[in-house]
Image (cartoon, rainbow, N blue to C red):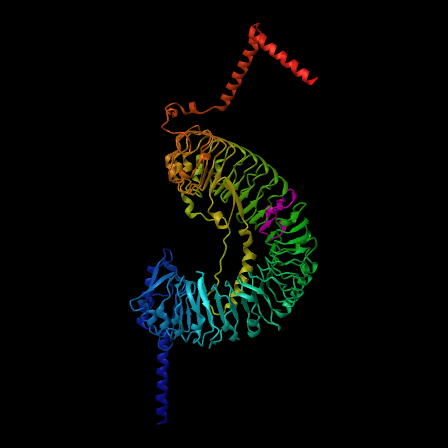
Amino acid sequence: MEGTLFLGQYLIWMMILLAQLHGYKSCIQKERTALLELKKYLISTSREGAFDHVLTTWTNDRNINCCHWKEIKCNLTSGRVTRIAFGNLYLKESTLLNLSLLHPFEEVQSLNLSGSNINGLFDDVEGVCELKNMQELYLSYNYLGQFPLCLTSLTGLRVLDLSSNQLTGKLPSALANLESLEYLSLFDNNFEGHFSLGWLANLSKLTVFKLSSKANSLQVESESSWKPKFQLSFIVLRSCNMEKVPHFLLHQNDLRQVDLSDNNISGKFPSWLLANNTKLESLLLQNNSLTSFQLPKAAHNLLFLEVSVNEFNQLLPDNIGWILPRLKFMNLANNSFQGYMPSSFGNMEMIEYMDISRNGFDGDLASSLGNMEKIEYMDISHNNFHGKLPKRFLNGCYSLVILKLSHNKLSGEIFPESTNFTRVSLLSMDNNLFTGKIGQGLRRLRSLRELDISNNKLTGVIPSWIGELPSLNALLLPNNSLEGDIPVSLFNTSYLKLIDLSANNLSGGIPPYVSSEYGAKLFLQDNNLSGVIPETLLTHVDVLDLRNNRLSGNIPEFTSIQEIRILLLRGNNLTGHIPRHLCANIQLLDLANNRLNGSISSCLSNNTSLGLGNEDYTSYADAVEVFPDSDTETDYTEDVDLKYRRTLGRQNGTSYDAATKTKIEFATKHRYDAYKGGNLELLFGIDLSENELSGEIPVELGDLLQLLSLNLSHNNLSGVIPESFSRLENVESLDLSFNRLQGRIPPQLTDLSSLAVFNVSYNNLSGVIPQGKQFNTFDTRSYLGNPLFCGKPTNLSCESNSFQEPDHGVEADEFTTDMGSFYWSFAAAYVTILIGILASLSFDSPWSRAWFYIVDTFVLKVRNLLC
């Protein structure tokens, strides 16, 4: 009997085990088919070229259990799908997700559709909201637009993430129904109207709440009458137009991260948040109106403190280093803190980031900075610090990676002695009062990638050993008083991306070759450089600025111009023809104010950067990586630390600041403007003015469809204005003045809707001035020196008998005013008349005797007056 009972129990356990194994081996066929249908739908709505990357593990191979597919999880006993995650798809714009495809998954508990480019949901019965077992729903980084109200009926939800969805309208009060919520993120949307934090009062399990609006019309309020049932770990209320720190936070004692940035909070710094929450690691309060900075009495383990862009205007507490000894990140920028830097800063051995830029500090850098042995990132720029850098600081902060001292009143020499900044990658000392030579102390900075000492009072020569720093990719020394030759070693740096030596007193020739592995940017303008431009200079160069030097000779037939995008040679003594080699993919070409001659080559129309080929144009500017302000992970403190580490790595590896400092000045619309960043990428122009160019304007220039500015003024160009210029639909400035052009202004030019500046003055043009659209905005200054013009805005009527148009059947040269011949004819006539008068006086006649009598009388009167 016992044996039979044992055998029965054994069989039951075996059946259960086999059932579990069977469930583990195979998913339900109905759901497998539904998953493949879902994949088929997603492929049909994916962007072109992304089809082969959609859910690649979901195949028809029946030997593979669909529960083993990536993005899928199943119940090991039943084999039913419990989790689906297919975020980060590349769906077409305006894609709507058909929720009916989710109906077969009755036991699904977690659905992740984040980052799928979904523009909305559709289903006759609202499929997601029928999945009553749903516990986790991730819909972030889509384009839903409207809050799906039916989601408030999913009372079993523990996680709801609708961040970054461009949601508009008011937040529904029905959120209070989701009493099981632990994680609720409504971050980075466009909500409007009023939202009361009291609606969250019944969410007793809530630990994470994130809300922000870019619409600047969301008003979040917190009544003082309610006490929450929950204990939050993370609270983010950014851009919510709050004027006070929410009162309910007084009842929280388990906070890890608090972000109340970009509000209107005024009054005192909420030190009670630190006192009440001993686990608090991150406190972000930037861009508010706080006025009084106070610290708690006891020490705290805070890691990140962000209070920039407030209205603090008192002394920074001297004990901040003892109260907050473990800080990794501190940003006090854009305030008005006063006095010296607290001596207790020297005790912050764990600090890794400090930013106290744009304040009102007015004192020496405290020598206690030298105790910051662990600091990696320090930014004290945009203050009023003055005096020399303390030796203890230079020798004690040996962990620094990024150091920014710019926009102060610091003085003395640049590292005259050795320092311990051996790990420094980025060093910004620009816009100070540093003097003397560039010191030998910089030689130990073997990790240096970017060095900026611009806008100081440096003298002496550029030391050749700077080019021997192995990692250097950006050197900025403009607006100093440096002299001597450019060291050849600077151009031999393998990782060179940017050299700016402009506005100094440098002389001598230009090094012949750039060894960089990248497209380098060379700014050498406004110096005293002389000699010829080397033929090999443009190899590995995409920006070259040599304006306003003393260079001579011809523009060389460059051996390599594949990478050049911007070439600026204005204001030198260059002669000869414009080489056909320059008919390349040049975005900006400035050859003005030289002595170039010959004709303009029609091959300029082959420039794909300016013509039809521009769609595939890749900007020369360094890419700037943008990190999102939030993500779906619940551990926000780790996110802050990760973004900080990424920032260090990005600035350490790609010369982030150097890219943003690339600035070009180019003359458009009769003025010089500075362009950088995204604006520079959109600027396309040619300036050949103030040369000795002759011949006709090539009609092919009308094919430069991307051109924004064309200046051919102050040359000897002849012929007519090409009708093809009517195709320059993007042109904003067109200057053809001071040439020898004749004929009419093509009426087709009135179609140039972007044209803001048009100048054809001082030519030999004639006929009726076109009117309409942009041409109605041009006054007489655009047409001066063309006496054969009529119509608006001149005072000459085209119907007047006194106005006669030239006979265009005669050769055009007959109507071209030869000013040289005119001057010679005038001189000859003057001499002839003078000789005739003198000859007539040589004969004795009554009028000649009268003339001499008058002259004698005049001489006598003058003599009497003088005596």
Of 811 and 826, the residue lying toward us: 826
In the current view of this chain or complex, which residue is farthest to the bottom?
A: 1
Relative to 578, residue 77 above or below: below
Q: Is residue 481 located in the magenta-colored stretch of the structure?
A: yes
Looking at the image, residue 97 sits to the left or right of residue 836; the answer is left
Residue 70 falls left or right of residue 844: left
Residue 542, visible in the rendered structure: no
**435, above or below 65, in the image:** above
Please name whichever residue, 58 or 866, is drawn nearer the observer in this view of the structure: 866
Count of numbered circles in the view: 0
Residue 178, x across and y down, in percent: 40, 74
Residue 229 lies in magenta, yes or no? Answer: no
Identify the magenta region. Answer: 467-492
Q: Nearer the viewer, residue 611 or 166?
A: 166
Q: How far from the left and from the top, in percent, is residue 552?
A: 58, 34
* The N terminus: image quadrant: bottom left
Q: Position of residue 710 (x, y in %)?
A: 46, 38
Q: In the shown orientation, is residue 339 left or right of residue 735? A: right
Dividing the picture into quadrants, the one containing residue 524 is top right
Q: Is residue 77 visible?
A: yes
Residue at figure coordinates x 34%, y 88% from the top left: 8
Vertical placement of 88 versus 812: above or below? Answer: below
Residue 258 drawn at (x, y percent)? 52, 69
